[in-house]
Image (tube, coloured by chain):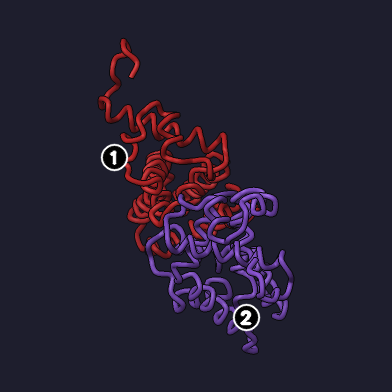
Chain colours: A purple, B red
Amino acid sequence: MTPGIPPRPGGRSARVRAAVHRAVEELLTESSPEALTMPVIAARAGVHPTTVYRRWGTLGELLASVAASRFSGDIVVPDTGSLRGDLETWMADVATDLADPDTLAVMRAAIGVGEEGGCACVADRHAQLAAILERGGGAPDVERAADLLLGPLYYRAIFTGRPADADWARGLVSVLLG
Amino acid sequence: MTPGIPPRPGGRSARVRAAVHRAVEELLTESSPEALTMPVIAARAGVHPTTVYRRWGTLGELLASVAASRFSGDIVVPDTGSLRGDLETWMADVATDLADPDTLAVMRAAIGVGEEGGCACVADRHAQLAAILERGGGAPDVERAADLLLGPLYYRAIFTGRPADADWARGLVSVLLG
């Protein structure tokens, strides 16, 4: 900690978390994912490696935590007045986010180091999708909606070089709703 | 190389490739992906690290190579006499493969270390899908088929804890064909 600077809200624990999360995101934009290790992250964040190990345990847990906070609260659930409109607007927003190379770098790294990484990337997306579907009477089941909307979108982003643009993503809504 | 053992077909180069690929798969089943480094892989394969760096350049290229060979030629394109039957059989086979934790470990690691990793996992799947669709008159476009068949399947496998079993995967064919 730098003396003289007043503590930010949340105290030291929140500051460490923010510094470590920021260090991970910076390192992922700068270098190859294989260079990402707990000691390297700690050095960039200006904290002792022990602090990082004590708090997150493994690189897998740390990256899942970074992914969960990166992909949470970043997209507003739309309210267009229709289920179709809400889903189309939301899909376009998710697709736009996935087109960002920095977004993809966080996702790939989180997936690469553990089973929980992929789930951390989409947990909030599923909660948002459930919230949209709950408002519409007779709306499809959230699992089926996730399969048919998020499935093709994340598949294109992670497994193919094909563009997953906002217009195409919006079009997936008609696969679900007809 | 062990003296006295006759060289396998392909000579030293093919043996090195096989030993290094096998070392990656073994290490991925044994330890956390973050422990996977070029020197560790070389040691397990019994080759000099320089050999590994010279041949594959980076861990990302090596893992893409392992994924491409792991997910290539492992599933036979079915010939049931109908497009629907072929797609259903094939989807069940792909889903069964994705339910294997060792399969998922190779996929996650390949995705984690570079942009080419995800594509290496599915390039052969796309070729097989194209081959199935080519036989059927008036079959859907291969991109749309990949979106609606492989999208939900790989999404469940990588991003959710939900089961992606063979019956469910077979059912996706009716989303595509009606």
- Determine which residue is flagged by label 1: B54
B92 or B14: nearer the viewer: B14
Determine whether, in the image, residue A110 is placed left or right of residue B22: right
Residue situated furthest top in the rendering:
B4
Q: Chain of mark 2?
A: A
Give the class, few, some or many, for how many residues have Cα within 10 Å of label 1's Cα (few <14, many ≥20).
few
Mark number, residue A76: 2
Looking at the image, residue B143 sits to the left or right of residue B9; the answer is right
Per the image, label 1 sits on a secondary structure element best described as helix
Can residue B177 be spotted in the picture?
no
The furthest residue to the left: B11
Q: Nearer the viewer, residue A100 or B68?
A: A100
Chain under disc 1: B
Q: Amino acid at mark 2?
A: Val
Residue B12 is at least partly visible in this image = yes
- Vertical placement of residue B97 versus A132, above or below: above
Whether discs 2 and 1 lie on one chain: the answer is: no
**SS at mark 2?**
loop
- Disc 1 residue type (three-letter): Arg
The residue shown at (62%, 54%) is A48
Residue at 31% x, 34% y: name it: B51
Residue A166 or residue A98, whichever sits in front: A98
